[in-house]
Image (cartoon, rainbow, N blue to C red):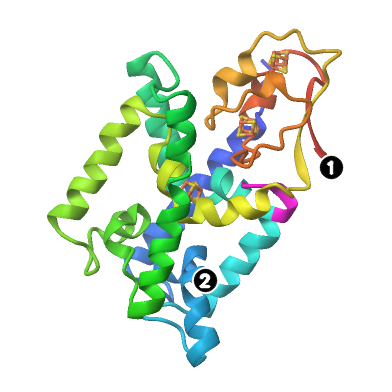
Amino acid sequence: MQIKLKITYLRYFFQIAVIGILIYLAFGYGERTFEAYCPFGGVEALYGLFTTQNYTCALAETNLAMFIGLVVLVVLSKKSFCGWICPIGAFSEVLNRIGFKIRKRKHYVKGKLDFFLRLLRYPVLILILYFTYKIGDLIFRGYDPFYLIFSGFGHGSLGTLSLVLMSGILVASVFIAMPFCRYFCPLGAVQDFLSWVGIVKIHRNADSCTECGLCNEVCPQLIEVSENQRINHIDCTNCLECTEACPEENCLEVKAF
Ligand code: SF4
Ligand code: SF4
Ligand code: SF4
C-alpha cells in the first residue's frame, strides 16, 4: 500500500512542534519565558527602544529578532507565520473545523459587515500601541489569547474579563471562521501592510481548472481561490490547503511572483 504524504502534514507538524516548545517554555524550562518569542512584542518594544533605548516591561532582544524575522517572512511568503507557526492560528483552525461541522457552512458574517469587521484589527493595533507606548506596560496581555493560554491566565490577566473574552472567542468560533485572526489580531494587522508584497504565492492555471470549487471550500481564510489567477489576498497564509484539495494536476501551484 502506498502512503501519500501531504505537505499539509508538514505544516501540522510545525504547528504542533511550536505549541510543544511554547508549553515547554511556559513551564519555565527554557532560558527565557514564552513571551520573549512573540513577534508582536518586537512591535511593542519599538517606541521604548527609540526613546529610552530600553525594552518595555518583560520584552527582550528575542522579541525584536522575531519581529524582524516576521517582516522578512511576510515579504517572502505572505502570512506564512500565521499558517505555519502561530499557535493561535493553529488553535483557530481547529476550532474553525469543529465549527464548520456544527454550522455546516463556512461563515455567517458576509458582505459589507464582514468587510467592516475586518477593518477592526487596525484600530485594535493603534489602541494597543498607543497605550503600551504611553503607559510603558504590556496592556494587551489581559486580552491576548496567546498570553492568556500559555501563561494559564497569569499575572497580566484581567480575571473575569479575560475569561469572558476567551469564552466569547470560543463561542464566536462556532459561527464565524477564525474570528480573532479575522477581526481583532494586531499582529495580523501589522503583517497586512507587507502581505501585499509576498513574493511566493499560489498561482492558478485557468486552462486546467474545472471550477469545481474545492479550493474555495477548504480555504480557512475564506479566499475565493477559483476566481483568481494569483492569490494576492493579504490574508493568504500559504497554508497549501487549497493546493492539496485541488484534484487537477498542476492547476494550483506555489510560485514566486
Ligand atoms: S492573525 Fe494573529 S492570531 Fe491569527 S494566526 Fe496570524 S498572528 Fe496568529
Ligand atoms: S480545486 Fe482546482 S480545479 Fe477546482 S476550482 Fe479550485 S483550482 Fe479549479
Ligand atoms: S488561498 Fe490557499 S494557501 Fe492561501 S490561505 Fe487559502 S487555502 Fe491557504
Q: Does mark 2's beta carbon lie closer than 8 Å to ligand 1? A: no
Where is residue 7 drawn, in percent x and y? Answer: 66, 34
Cβ atoms at labels 2 and 1 below 8 Å apart: no
Q: Earlier in the sequence, mark 2 or mark 1?
A: 2
User: Residue 16: where, in percent of width, then height?
Assistant: 48, 46
Ligand 2 located in image quadrant: top right
Horizontal placement of 162 versus 111: left or right?
left
Q: Quadrant location of residue 159?
A: bottom left
Residue 4 vertical position relative to residue 65 in the rendered view, above or below:
above
Query: Which dot marks residue 42?
Result: 2
Q: Which residues are magenta?
A: 75-79
Residue 257 disc label: 1
Left or right position of 122 against 127: right
Per the picture, the main secondary structure of the magenta-coloured stretch is helix
Looking at the image, which residue is at 41% across and 81% down? 56
Pick out the residue farthest to the left.
160
Tell me the tag on residue 13. none
Q: Is residue 163 visible?
A: yes
* Residue 233 painted magenta: no
Which type of secondary structure does the marked residue at label 2 adopt? helix
Say what secondary structure mark 1 lies in.
Answer: loop
Residue toward you, 220 or 1: 220
Relative vertical location of residue 76 with respect to residue 234 in this rendering, above or below? below
